[in-house]
Image (cartoon, coloured by chain):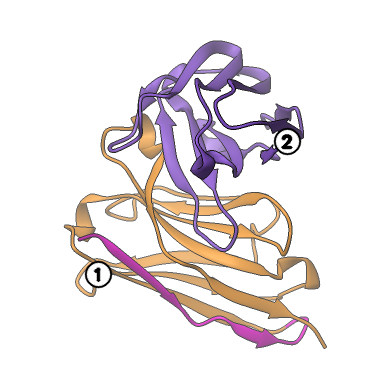
Chain colours: A orange, B purple
């Protein structure tokens, strides 16, 4: 069974940093592109970042570029999101999601974690 | 950057009725890169449709997707009680990454 479990969320002050983790199991992690998607309270989904299976390709939303860094450790079956210079508008539930191999360019997300809440407030 | 617009914002229907949801892109999107998701309160999204018209594993055939270019449609042929949720379209724009639409809420009339 595919499982994605996020951790690392919490309350942080504006300007602070946080590192999210996503532990993957039930599939060959090193074969799949992975993604972070966030959802502010009561709002819609916002794509944050994506990383290819071997970390060769990395993309960021303009809203987080230069502040967030996505990475992965295939030996540990883990995905990470380092978030620096956090702002109030970064407050959201952050989901880890796996791209499906059958979707061109990894363009669809077939499995999602349950999310971890990040709150940026003084 | 490609912007996705979904309409209507809210669709109020009764069980058994047909739902037609629209997703319009600000510029042409490859059909291969258009997906639809369903999200219920307190849950993670679920993939329904990929490649504009292919159903994901385990998705009932009352869900169908169509469209090309800038106009895409998700159709639910007969609404079941469990289908009342928010639906998002998503596109992939190569080096520009991914974009989600703002969502359409399907609620019970």
**Element carrying mark 1:** loop
Q: Residue at x 64, y 31 (%)?
A: B14
Q: What chain is tagged by disc 2?
A: B
Q: Residue at x 57, y 11 (%)?
A: B69
In the rendered image, the vertical position of residue A76 relative to residue A34, given as above or below: below
Tag 2: Cα neighbours inside 10 Å, few (<14), some, or many (≥20)?
few
Q: Image quadrant of residue B3?
A: top right
Q: Position of residue A6 (x, y in %)?
A: 43, 73
Q: Image quadrant of residue A48?
A: bottom right
**Residue A83 visible somewhere in the drawing:** no
Bounds of the magenta span? Answer: A1-15
Q: Is-magenta flag for residue A12?
A: yes
Between marks 2 and 1, how big is the CA–CA gap? 45 Å
Front one among A84 and B109: B109
Q: Residue at x 68, y 50 (%)?
A: A44
Q: Position of residue A25 (x, y in %)?
A: 22, 67
Q: Which mark is residue A77?
A: 1
Report the residue that reaches farthest toward the right: A122
Front one among B58 and A113: B58
């Amino acid at each position: 069974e595919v499982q994605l479990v996020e951790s690392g969320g919490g309350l942080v002050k504006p300007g602070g940093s946080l590192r999210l983790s996503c532990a993957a199991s039930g599939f060959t992690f090193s074969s799949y592109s992975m993604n972070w998607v966030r959802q502010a309270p009561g709002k819609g989904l916002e794509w944050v970042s994506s990383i290819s299976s071997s970390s060769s390709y990395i993309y960021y939303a303009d809203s987080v570029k230069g502040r967030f860094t996505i990475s992965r450790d295939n030996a540990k079956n883990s995905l990470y999101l380092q978030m620096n210079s956090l702002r109030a508008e970064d407050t959201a539930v952050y989901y880890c999601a796996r791209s499906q191999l059958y979707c061109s360019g990894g363009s669809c997300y077939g499995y999602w974690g349950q999310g971890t809440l990040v709150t940026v407030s003084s | 950057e490609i912007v996705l617009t979904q309409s209507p914002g809210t669709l109020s229907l009764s069980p058994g009725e047909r739902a037609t949801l629209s997703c319009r892109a600000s510029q042409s999107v490859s059909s291969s890169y258009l997906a639809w998701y369903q999200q219920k309160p307190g849950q993670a999204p679920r993939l329904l449709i990929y490649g504009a018209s292919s159903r994901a594993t385990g998705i009932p055939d009352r869900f169908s997707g169509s469209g090309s270019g800038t106009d895409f449609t998700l159709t639910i042929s007969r609404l079941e009680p469990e289908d009342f949720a928010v639906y998002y379209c998503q596109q992939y724009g190569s080096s520009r990454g991914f974009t989600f639409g703002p969502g359409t809420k399907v609620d019970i009339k």
